[in-house]
Amino acid sequence: MAATGQDQQSTKNGSRRHTALVVSVTTTVQALATMCTLVPAAIAPELARAFEVPASWIGFQVSLTYLGALAMSLVVGQFVLRLGALRTSQGALALSGIGLALAATSSSSMIGFAIGSVLVGFGYGLTNPAAAHLLMRITKPNNRNFIFSLKQSGVPLGAVMAGLAAPSLTLMFGWQAAFLICAAVPMGMMIVLQPLRRSWDWDRDPSVRLRQSPIADLRMILRHPILRWFSLAAFCFSAVQVSLSTFAVTMLVKDLSFGLVEAGIVLSALQVAGGSGRIIWGGVADWFGAGDRVLVGLGLIAAAAGVMTMFLAPGTSVVIIYGALLLFGFSAIGWNGVFLAEVAHLAPKGQIGNATAGALVPSYAGVLFGPMTFSGLYMLTGQYTAAFGMFAVFSVAGAALMLIASVKAQGLRRS
């Protein structure tokens, strides 16, 4: 049932208080969903011992999670229109928590762990289209990149939560208890959000059919020349970002002789750098009014950081290790907010959620492809540091594709 006109007006108003609430809620949902996806990566060496598999196999688990996110991104646009953006966000929290809890039930078999990973991916796939729908109500052209980037800081925030909580909880209570404790947090947040549902989902349309072609949103993106190149660049950027978040702890433990908790702290610092980067790059994009060119620069910086990582070794100064990884996080994790803001800006009227979902299909494909490719490179080279250096090719490719999109965008502006 639609909300009253008064409710609609309160949701639409541009007051600072309402804007802060929307940004806080969408950022928190993003952070908790991300935390659930990265808890396994934060304790990968411990999981490897529990299941008696190589630690590098965590790449396949992450790919499985994002396969679920990719599948959900094919249909989430219709969920936002029919159920409402806030209800969709609640669904993201529920699926993330349930999936992580299910994974915790797997003591010896990988089947439950795999199913739980897919469910977490389903939850993660719901977050961005729902958030984009809510954020476009409160943004203006001169602050759009900053606000979207502020919301996307929830991704590294979630990684920080996973990096700090999961290793310590695992050492104290075991990995299964760590999973269950982390799973309880998004479930609780889902309940906390319920009072906002009526006023925030005033524009939902129960008549919208959930059934549609699973590639309808993707087809929209492919028909749009600028969004097509944007999405292809996102494929490359996502592959690098998720590989960094997934394998940083394992690289530090296996290649650089860090302890598990110490490596988790480095992962958290890296993610803080990424979160700071998202906010800073969003502000830079708004200042210059050129998010596409900012993304080109980010790709090149990430490539340089990847090459620097290749030269890290056990005897390397801790300051240099931190410096290289913080620069890596600042660039390779700092791109998403600017990207999503540009997609929302370019989206056809009334189809922000659909356009965001379609643009995220190649992005999630990169997330799916990246860890598997990285695992293959590790098997080939025997070193995580070397694999990161080789992965710089993806960052360069993303910068080149974004440059093509930028040139096309400039041509469109002139015409």
Image: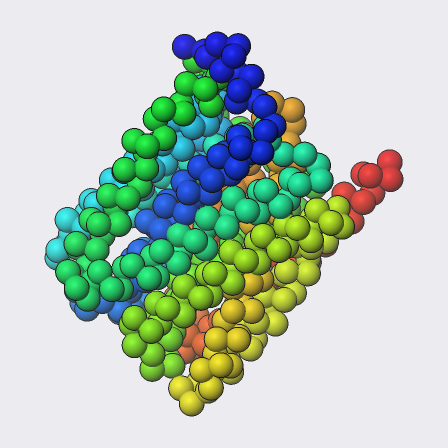
The image shows residue 130 at horizontal and vertical percentages of 48, 32
The image shows residue 149 at horizontal and vertical percentages of 57, 47
Query: Count the marks: how many?
Result: 0
Which residue ends up furthest to the left in the rendered image? 108
Which residue ends up furthest to the right in the rendered image? 414
| Quarter residue 328 falls in | bottom right
Q: Is residue 215 visible?
A: no
Residue at 51% over, 56% down: 275
Position of residue 231 in the picture relative to residue 322 (left or right): right
Position of residue 89 relative to residue 160, above or below, is above
Viewer-proximal residue among 135 and 76: 135
Which residue ends up furthest to the bottom in the rendered image? 315
Residue at 34% over, 79% down: 258
Position of residue 196 relative to residue 182, above or below, is above
Residue at 61% over, 28% down: 14
Position of residue 355 relative to residue 206, above or below, is below
Position of residue 399 in the picture relative to residue 243 (left or right): right
